Amino acid sequence: MTVKRKNIRLKLMTLILAVLFTLSQIDSSSLSTGSAEEEKILVGAVTTQLASIVREIGSEKIEVVAILPPQVDPHHYEPSMNVLLNILSKAKLVVTTGLHHFPVEEKIYQAINEGLVKVRVIGLSDYERNGLKLLVNPKTGDFNVHEYYYSIKGIKAIASTVTEELIRLDQGNKQYYAERLNDYLLRLNKIEEAINSLLDGNRYNVRVITYTPLMQYVIEDLGLKLVDVIVSEVDVEPSEEDLSNMLTILMNHEADYILFSDIEAIENPKLLDLLSRQGLRYHIVPLSSLAETPELASLSTAILLSSSNISYNGEMENSSFNILLMLSILANIVLISIIILLVIKVRRRGG
């Protein structure tokens, strides 16, 4: 029953975030200008998340192709070399997560090194130059290269790097790209402000465990304390010792919650059931649902944590109450967003 209520809250929260993001795009899309016949720069992005960030900067001036289809595991899936070369040969820029992260990225650098294609490729070292700070995986002691593109800080670094590259390729639209970056950074700052309002000063006392290192950068965004990671890497099965340590930490109140991505939750139903039966707190963050809006990952996590008093209060553990509450929040968000957009449009037309 607890798992079912969590799923209801998860779906409603995803709906709220999707509506909020969609409404935030109405004004910018309706005011876009430019000739449809203008030649566009083709940019290849390895993942849907990276493609989303690139699109925020290039908008109508570029065409973005996600090299990996959505909803596939990038750690295992890779297109054929023919498909990859077809994209690389047409692209002016390729955006990757790093040199040796995903198998497809190994193929990309292999094709370039062998002289099969010639294209500008950016990756992890470029983002570090623009402010990305790699975190250390507490389980392995190595740098964590997973999912930094879901964090606000990581997105800012990627967006700044992409802007530099698009300006280099298209000097005539330098101001356009710079303004798009500025608008995007302002929006990211607004998201950070919303997170601050949701968590207030309580965040620094919140201690969490994650199932894998995937959520580490989001946790860093929120200022939470990462106590432990259950498994050291993606696709590693937890040992009995790993699970015993997790239960000990939670039962001894050394951590307040354990965080799962939605994919991790789907793959570990027995573990979730165990946590529920033991009355131990966990949250499921809908990362896969936010692939096209990665900037909302930290905000969605903040919403989950800020609502935890409702989620775990015995008097309020009523699914009907939670549904009505979330729908009320959704209605208010929609109404406020529409009013703000109308005011902005009236001011622009009048000015």
Image: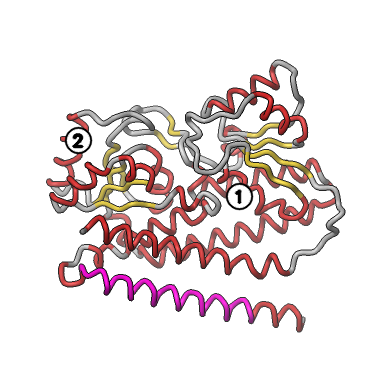
Query: Residue 329 placed where, x, y %?
Result: 40, 74
Residue 268: say if magenta.
no
Observer-nearest residue: 164 or 77? 77
Please report the residue visible at 37 percent of the width from the left and 37 percent of the height from the top.
213
Task: Report the front residue among 187 and 108.
Answer: 108
**Residue 1 point in image, percent of width and height:** 21, 59
Residue at (52% x, 78% y) in the render: 336
Q: Which mark is residue 140?
A: none
Q: In this view, does 328 lie above or below 225?
A: below
N-terminal label among 2 and 1:
1
Above or below residue 30? Residue 55 is above
In the drawing, what numbered circle is on residue 52?
1
Q: Which amino acid does label 1 sit on?
A: Ser
Label 2 crowd (10 A; few <14 / some 14-19 / many >=20):
some
Give the CA separation, mark 2 to mark 1: 36 Å
Side of 53 where 217 appears, left or right = left
Q: What stretch is highlighted in magenta?
A: 317-342
